[in-house]
Image (cartoon, rainbow, N blue to C red):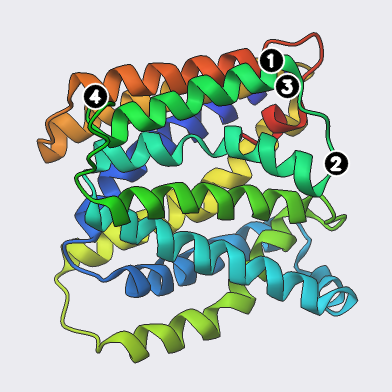
Amino acid sequence: MNERHALGYGLTAVLLWSTVATAFKITLNYFSPPQMVVIASLVSVIALLAIATYQGKLTNLLTTFYARPWYYLALGLINPLAYYLVLFKAYALLPASQAQPLNYSWAITLTLMAAIFLHQKIGRQDWIACGLGYLGVVVIATKGDLLALQFESPLGVGLALFSTLLWALYWIINTKNTADPVLGLLLGFLTSLPFSIGLSFYVGGWQTVPWQGWLAVTYVGLFEMGITFVLWLNALRLTTNTARISNLIFISPFISLLLLATIIGEQITAATIIGLLFIISGLVVQQWRSKPSPQSQLL
């Protein structure tokens, strides 16, 4: 029964994550990246407060924060503040069909950063995975013209890759977190909110937004930042086969590309498909071990 529930949670999380690239592009028609971070963070806070209350954990929130206030402030400044500011700006500058696969290489970035910060050994499979993954990145970024190395938006590509560094850094710092993961995530959103609100007013005023924009940004807050993460945690907690659940994530980018083509009408180039296949191949090689890697549990 637990395995069935784990599979259900995992599939639901993957299907929801598959929709967020489309939601990002729709929301960016109405909000700037800083404004998106503010509203989506507020929605996530409300959702996580409800979840923590339902689970009977909310009474531990202040105790958890006061035990390590600077730690949770650092987490919040990295994710959601810096990570989503960078990611949303990358989506604003690039077609989502390019930004999403580039960001998807974060798990390979995590391998390299874990070697630096956690002193983990990089094996032969990891080097092969990195080679395949970043070859895919170059194929997507150059639209297949590898020799010319001409990028449609160098800044957009740079931001998409920088987002993988921020996300990997967040998970590396999060390995030191012994608190409940829902409370830890909630504290990150709460501590970052004053900064994101201040930044949104500093860079530009707020304008009147139709209901479609509010619906889109609410969807991002619920299903990219908040509820979906809890679903994924539950899937990993209930399963006895972490690798099998983690492998579900491989179907997400392909569903995402299909939705982008169908709903937004983005043209999906052959270079994007080929580059994504290189990235996925690198991730498969990385997970093809007798024991699940730490990265597979963080996907």
Nearest to N terminus: mark 1 or mark 2? 2
Which residue matches tag 3? 242
1 and 2 marks in contact (CB < 8 Å): no
Q: How far apart are marks 2 and 4 (CA)?
A: 35 Å
Q: How far apart are marks 1 and 2 (CA)?
A: 17 Å
2 and 3 marks in contact (CB < 8 Å): no
Q: How far apart are marks 2 and 3 (CA)?
A: 23 Å
Q: Nearer the viewer, residue 162 or 37?
A: 162
Nearest to N terminus: mark 3 or mark 1? 1
Name the quadrant containing residue 208: bottom left
Q: Nearer the viewer, residue 134 or 36?
A: 134
**Element assignment for label 1:** helix
Which residue matches tag 4? 144
From the image, state whether disc 3 or disc 4 is nearer to you: 4
Q: Which mark is residue 125?
A: 1
3 and 1 marks in contact (CB < 8 Å): no
Nearest to N terminus: mark 2 or mark 4? 2
Q: How far apart are marks 1 and 4 (CA)?
A: 25 Å
Residue 52: x and y in percent read 69, 60
Q: Of the residues shown, which amino acid type is indicated by label 2? A: His
Can residue 158 be seen by looking at this rendering?
yes
Q: Which residue is drawn at 60% across and 65% down?
A: 78
Which residue matches tag 2? 119
Rendered-image quadrant of the C terminus: top right
Residue 43: x and y in percent read 45, 66
